[in-house]
């Protein structure tokens, strides 16, 4: 099992804020690839509508970035992931797309110490987040469903003031047994 903790939740659940705060505290964190892909494509002059016009292509590009990132991470290092491979499966299901063979293969060996599913905040649309409230709730439910199907420990994080939400997460971070024992001696 890796020492990775996933921060997930539907659109507008506060994932990016939590990841930013964790990084400010010195923790290893990752980026959300969907937004990164949109940002890098917008620099080339493409619109969000153009980028998302072929959802299969978009989801596959996000998946390939996620696969590359998770393969490069140290499985023993405590790291907070802004979404993880199972998130891709939830989006494939939401979009009613057949999952990529690479995704299905990777999910067979993917492991995460704990998954923090952030309860939804009011939907705040921006240039990259274009989902409706209905879509927000459906995606959120699918994310939790996928992680639980994969046998992940899912901790639901309630809506709290930002710092209290961060402390809620940090107080529930679990360490590998070997590290827990060595720090207790």
Image: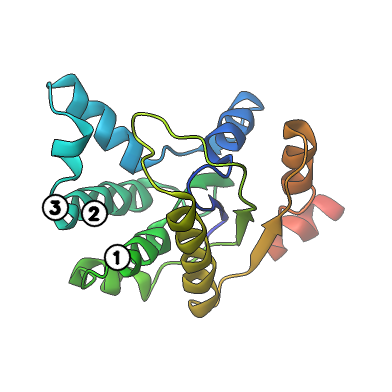
SS under mark 3 = helix
Residue 4 coordinates in the image, percent (x, y): 54, 53
Side of 65 relative to 30 (left or right): left
Q: Residue at x 48, y 46 (%)?
A: 11
SS under mark 2 = helix
Residue at the spot of label 1: 92
Q: Are marks 2 and 3 in contact (CB under 8 Å)?
A: yes
Residue 48, label in figure: none
The residue most toward the right is 185
Side of 156 relative to 13 (left or right): right
- In-front residue for pair 185/30: 30
SS under mark 1 = helix
- Answer whether residue 141 is visible to the viewer in this image: yes
Where the C terminus falls, by quadrant? bottom right
Residue 43 coordinates in the image, percent (x, y): 19, 20
Q: Residue at x 14, y 52 (%)?
A: 57
177 relative to 182, above or below: below
- In-front residue for pair 112/142: 142
Residue at the spot of label 2: 59
Residue 57, label in figure: 3
Q: Are marks 1 and 2 in contact (CB under 8 Å)?
A: yes
Spatial CA span between label 1 and label 3: 11 Å
């Amino acid at each position: 099992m890796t020492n990775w903790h996933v921060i997930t939740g539907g659109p507008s659940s506060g994932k990016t804020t939590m990841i930013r705060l964790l990084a400010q505290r010195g923790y290893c964190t990752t980026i959300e690839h969907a937004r990164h892909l949109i940002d890098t494509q917008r620099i080339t002059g493409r619109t969000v509508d153009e980028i998302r016009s072929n959802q299969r292509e978009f989801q596959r590009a996000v998946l390939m970035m996620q696969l590359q990132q998770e393969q490069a991470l140290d499985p023993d290092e405590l790291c907070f992931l802004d979404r993880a491979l199972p998130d891709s499966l939830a989006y494939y299901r939401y979009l009613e797309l057949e999952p990529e063979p690479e995704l299905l293969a990777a999910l067979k060996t993917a492991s995460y110490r704990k998954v923090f599913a952030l309860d939804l905040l009011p939907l705040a649309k921006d240039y990259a987040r274009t989902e409706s409230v209905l879509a927000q709730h459906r995606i959120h439910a699918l994310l939790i469903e996928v992680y639980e199907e994969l046998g992940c420990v899912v901790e639901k994080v309630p809506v709290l003031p930002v710092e209290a939400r961060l402390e809620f997460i940090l107080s529930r971070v679990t360490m590998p047994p070997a590290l827990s024992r060595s720090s207790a001696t």
